[in-house]
Amino acid sequence: MLLSKKQPSAAATQWIEKVKYHKNRDSYFKFLGNPHFRYTAFLLVFLSLWFLLQVFWFPPTKPTQTKFSTTTPKPSAGKCNGNVAVYVYNLPAEFNLGLLDDCSHLNVYTNMCPHVANHGLGQPLDNMDLQSSDSNPWFATHQFIAEMIFHARVDNHACRTWDPSKANLFYVPFYGGLHVSSNFREPNHAIRDALAVRLVDYLQAQPTWRKNNGKDHFLALGRTSWDFMRTDSGPDFGANCLLNLPCVKNMSVLTVERNPWKGSNQHGIPYPSYFHPSTSDQMMTWQNMMRQSNRPYLFSFIGAPRKGVGKAAIRDEMIKQCMESTQCKILKCDHGNPKCYNPSEILKVMRESRFCLQAPGDSFTRRSTFDAILSGCIPVFFSRHTAYTQYSWFLPEEASKYSVYMNEQSEESKRIEEVLMKIPKEEVDTMRATVIDMIPRLTYAHPNASHSDLGFEDAVDVALQALAQHVRDKI
């Protein structure tokens, strides 16, 4: 039992009693009988014993990691299969986390501060399913933020190594998408390209780069490849030259949309949706809900009309056909419709549909494709570059197993309802089952999820495995 004022130690008692009986013998020790001294002596003894107890009884603890890339985090539990050992460069802050200091200017169209929160997951959503689970897996995730989520996942990944001599992959966590979108309106190309050029200079000075001339290095970018491939002859819509630099062409580049013709070193990765589970239970619960979901609509379309002859034609046709059909659910996103910015409303439309139309947007690909798959809705494509030439690491080899394809210039695209109605119910059920089985590998798990609790391979796991094999073949 710890000492108290009423129960002094035996040693202290003996000392005080000795002073009491001999206080008249030596005037020098008279003050020892003073009650203030007795209390002070007791307090010193008590604090000394308490300090020793803390040092020798309780083990020291390590400080909590609050930033995933400025300190050494504990890797997630579980074992890597031995095929992947990824080393993460500790880049100067100007290439990633330093950019977040000015988050309100990271995009010329919107304030990105709410979106870069929670390692890029964005703000938590409180009006979604699975709210009773241990941790909320739903976030209002921005469609062009994959680079931040990828960084956070790899920083806490079981396959991460801190020893570059043991690595077969070298990850360069450059927030290139956030940087380029902050400079879309910069007229000076030298200023627009400056950070990309400094990154290349930094990498070429590293011994780890020189070993294989960067062939085992990779970037992950949250925007389309077109934003990093400005040419002198093409239109200038704000892109920089990052992917045209010879040094970067030696690397592998993960991007939400690759160039199908000039992107031999580019590999498509999924756009992030809103679901970021921390456990396999959350994933399985969601998949079961999608299997049981009532789908009263044959097909649906979510989107706005587009300007321009090519883009406008197919979108206008889809909107027209959907509005004329009693079997189609439409969510028009023109005039700032607030429902189009509400994840709950978006997923509700898709969960009630058997097929989801995926027209090309401002570029070939759409985040909506991954929202549809998350909702168990079979995607209908009108360009092969919306998915088939993009995400080969993630999608089944046979496209007809999980999707429907109609060439946007074909007669089929002018009678969508008729074509979809002809697909037998048994085939539709099989396709939907395949789509729902695809959800885990197209999902970005929560960066804080432990490998043992996760229990499934997410988009980052799939990308690292495929990338390691690609690098082995290349080297």
Image (tube, rainbow, N blue to C red):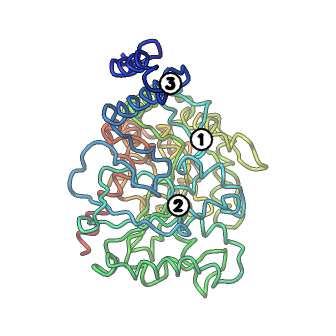
Q: SS class of the residue under badge 1?
A: strand
Distance between mark 1 and mark 2 Cα atoms: 27 Å
The amino acid type of the residue labelled 2 equals Gly
Numbered disc total: 3
Q: Which residue is mark 1?
A: 300
Asked if residue 322 can be seen in this view, the reply is yes
As drawn, which residue projects farthest toward the top? 6
Structural distance between the alpha carbons of marks 3 and 1: 96 Å
Residue at figure coordinates x 58%, y 83% from the top left: 231
Q: Position of residue 367 (x, y in %)?
A: 55, 52
**Label 2: which residue?**
222
Residue 165 placement, left or right of 233 = left
* Residue 301: quadrant of the picture: top right
The crowd level at tag 2 (other Cα within 10 Å; few <14, some 14-19, many 20+) is many
> Does residue 182 appear to the left or right of 177 in the view shown?
right
Quarter of the image for the N terminus: give it.
Answer: top left
Residue appearing at x 45%, y 38% in the figure: 277
Dots 1 and 2: beta carbons under 8 Å? Answer: no
Report the mark closest to the observer, 3 or 1: 3
Front residue of 266/125: it is 125
What residue is rendered at 35% in x and 38% in y?
454
What residue type is disc 3 on?
Lys
Which residue is label 3 attached to? 30
Q: Nearer the viewer, mark 1 or mark 2?
A: 2
Residue at 40 percent across and 32 percent down: it is 48
Determine the secondary structure under disc 2.
Answer: loop
Badge 1 crowding class, 10 Å Cα cut-off, few under 14, some 14 to 19, many 20 or more, is many
